[in-house]
Amino acid sequence: MVEAKQSFTVPWLDLDPILLRRYAAGELRADSRFEYVHPWRLFSEIEGKRVLCLASGGGQQSAVFGLLGAKVTVVDLSEGQLRGDRRAAEHYGYEITPSRLT
């Protein structure tokens, strides 16, 4: 799946950190469909907290939490997905702790 670049395997490398932080602070609103799945309150007060991402989209969810200042641990079965998480972390300049289950 990673090699086929399916949408859920491609790291989010085009996030705007400023807009993301403003959304997490409740300063920006999103489309109601997005807010239903990702309410801004879930992303407020994350800085410094430990977040465990399980099979989290190869650099998608981990990117959001990392950019908001969380200490991110990512667990996945796929080395390809973990590569995406590492790529996003390097791109944005935050640290993650990746772990592959076998």
Image (tube, rainbow, N blue to C red):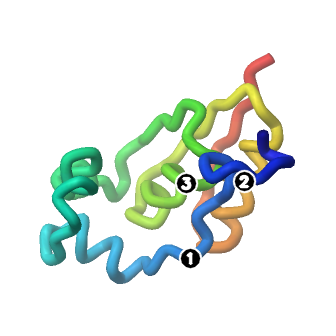
Q: Are marks 2 and 1 in contact (CB under 8 Å)?
A: no
Residue under circle 3? 60
- Any mark on residue 83, and which? none
Is 37 drawn above or below residue 100 in the view shown?
A: below
The residue depicted at 41 percent of the width and 62 percent of the height is 69
Instruction: Measure how far apart labels 2 and 3 are at the Cα level.
Output: 8 Å
The residue depicted at 65 percent of the width and 63 percent of the height is 88
Residue under circle 1? 14
Secondary-structure class at tag 2: helix
Secondary-structure class at tag 3: loop
Q: Are marks 2 and 3 in contact (CB under 8 Å)?
A: yes
Give whichever of discs 2 and 1 has the lower sequence position. 1
Residue at the outermost top position: 102
Q: Is residue 16 left or right of residue 88?
A: left
> How many circles with numbers are drawn on the protein?
3
Q: Is residue 11 left or right of residue 24?
A: right
Res 16 → quadrant: bottom left
Q: Are marks 3 and 1 in contact (CB under 8 Å)?
A: no
Residue 77: x percent and y percent? 73, 26
Residue under circle 2? 84
What's under tag 3, amino acid-wise? Gln
Quadrant where the C terminus sits is top right
- Residue nearer the viewer, 28 or 44: 28
Res 14 → quadrant: bottom right
Give whichever of discs 3 and 1 has the lower sequence position. 1
Q: Is residue 80 left or right of residue 28?
A: right
- Residue nearer the viewer, 93 or 34: 34
Give whichever of discs 2 and 3 has the lower sequence position. 3
Category of crowding for the residue at label 2, using alpha-carbon neighbours closer than 10 angstroms: few (below 14), some (14–19), many (at least 20):
many
- Residue nearer the viewer, 56 or 92: 56
What's under tag 1, amino acid-wise? Asp
